[in-house]
Amino acid sequence: MQHLCIALPIQPGKTQDLKDFVNTLTESRWAEYDDFQKRSRVQKVVWFLQSSPHGDQFLIYNAAEDLSRLASDFFASTHPFDLWFGQQLQEITGVDLRKVQAAGLPVQLLAYGY
């Protein structure tokens, strides 16, 4: 099992947009989100909102057997939901996840209980 936790900045004034995005996913677009995760072969996803003196952060944790495949599939996808999902994240965080290079991803330093 591979693990990835990434912290993305939330653009000023976009924290409520993140909450609205999550509500949209969990209320009206859950079936599409579930399909997205199944297509990506993700086994676990946990999202957090972290407030700090430097601004709000969006923390995403994923667990999967092959995170590089997850990333390459997402980056290459032309599925309408995947494009919408990426666009929402880019508008909220200012980060285009399709352009993140492997060298820019977090490095796991410690794991306990896995």
Image: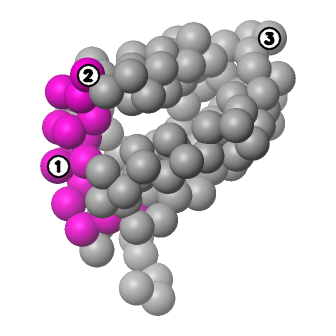
Q: Nearer the viewer, residue 87 or 14?
A: 87
Mark 3 or 1 closer to N-term?
A: 3
Q: Position of residue 80 (x, y in %)?
A: 38, 22
The quarter of the picture where residue 58 lies is top right
Residue ID at (44%, 28%): 81
Q: Position of residue 77 (x, y in %)?
A: 24, 28
Q: Position of residue 38 (x, y in %)?
A: 37, 57
Q: Disc 2 designates what residue? A: 78
Mark 1 or 2 closer to N-term?
A: 1
Q: Which quadrant of the rendered structure holds the C terminus?
A: bottom left
Q: Give the spatial CA distance, label 3 vs label 2.
A: 29 Å
Amino acid identity at mark 2: Thr
Q: Give the spatial CA distance, label 1 vs label 2.
A: 16 Å
SS assignment at label 1: helix
Which mark is drawn over residue 56? none
Name the mark nearer the viewer: 3 or 2. 2
Residue ID at (70%, 45%): 26
Amino acid identity at mark 1: Arg
- Magenta span includes 64: yes
Name the mark nearer the viewer: 3 or 1. 1
Q: Disc 3 designates what residue? A: 13
Amino acid identity at mark 3: Gly
Q: Which residues are magenta?
A: 63-78
The quarter of the picture where residue 15 lies is top right
Q: Position of residue 4 (x, y in %)?
A: 38, 55
Mark 3 or 2 closer to N-term?
A: 3
Q: Which quadrant of the rendered structure holds the N terminus?
A: bottom left
- Magenta span includes 76: yes
Q: With respect to residue 98, does 11 lie above or below?
A: above
Q: Disc 1 designates what residue? A: 69
